[in-house]
Structures are given as structure tokens and as C-alpha cells.
Amino acid sequence: MTDYMGAYSSEVVAGIYELGRMYFDMGYSGPAERIFTGLASSAPGQTPALVGLGLLRLEQGRVEDAVALLGRELETGNFHVEAKMGLAAACLARGDMAKAKSILVPLAADLEGLRGAISPAVRDLWEAMALRCDA
């Protein structure tokens, strides 16, 4: 595959990712999937495209595919908060509360260290998932 992304600045690549995220947020899974897939193969590690693909698969009910994609992103060491949150959500979706909790408990320290750098909505989502693990 040709590396088209190498011709673009990191700002442009980030903008392409944001376009994919916008499509995903609006429910346009086809364009979002094409963008995330392209970024994951052409600009690996520059955006959380694997997280986007993983969340898209989770939304489609393809939980095991989501777990695999989110695990791949987690292995890269990039976007670890996003990958861990997505992986915890996928574990909850498949009913594996223990695995979700094993991801969420150490993630609390990461979130605390990033206070001010992350959206309060991320912390709220973490709390909602943690409560579900304890339910």
C-alpha cells in the first residue's frame, strides 16, 4: 500500500482523524470506517484510529473484533487512555466484569495524573463503567 499519509503534516492527519470521528459521532459508520481503516494502515500510531475502529466494531455488536483492535492499540503504547476505556467497554459488553475491572482500577491513577488534560466526560464515563463492574 502506498504511504499517502507521509505526504501530509501531522495536523492534516489529525484533521482527517477528526473527520472520521465526526462521522462516527453522527452515525455515519461507512465513511468513519474507511477513514479509520486508512489511517490505521497509512499513519499507524499518529491517531487513535484503531480505537475508532474498535468502538465502531463494538457499536456493530462485533465485540471480539473490538477487543482485538483495542488490544492492538494498547500494545502500541499510544493513546493508552482511549484504548483502555474502549477495551473496558468491550469487556463489559461481553459480560466480563472482572476483566473490565482489572482495566479500570489502574486506569484511575492514569486519569488522576491527567486531571485538567482530559474532559470531565471521560472521568464520568470511567465512573459509570466502574459502577457497572461493581453492580
Image (spheres, rainbow, N blue to C red):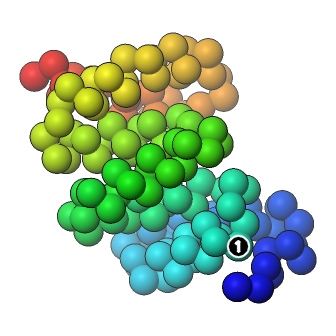
Does residue 119 sit above or below 69 in this rendering?
above
**In the rendered image, which quarter is residue 29 located in?**
bottom left
Crowdedness of circle 1 by 10 Å Cα count: few (<14), some, many (20+)? some
- Residue at 46% from the left image edge and 22% from the top image edge: 107
| Closest to the observer, 44 or 131 | 44
Answer left or right for 65 relative to 82.
left
- View extreme (left): residue: 135
Answer left or right for 85 relative to 113.
left
Does residue 64 sit above or below 42 in this rendering?
above
Q: Where residue 99 sits: x, y (%)? A: 26, 30
Count of all numbered marks drawn on residues in the image: 1
Q: Where residue 18 sits: x, y (%)? A: 63, 64
Q: Is residue 115 visible?
A: no
Answer left or right for 3 relative to 114.
right
Q: Is residue 101 visible?
A: yes
Q: Quadrant of the N terminus?
A: bottom right
Q: Amino acid at mark 1?
A: Ser
**Which residue matches tag 1?**
42
| Closest to the observer, 15 or 82 | 82
Q: Where residue 54 sits: x, y (%)? A: 41, 58
Q: Quadrant of the C terminus?
A: top left
- Residue at 70% from the left image edge and 73% from the top image edge: 42
- Residue at 44% from the left image edge and 27% from the top image edge: 123
**In the rendered image, which quarter is residue 56 located in?**
bottom left
**Element type where label 1 sits in the image:** helix
- Residue at 86% from the left image edge and 72% from the top image edge: 6
Answer left or right for 101 relative to 2.
left
Q: Where residue 71 sits: x, y (%)? A: 44, 47
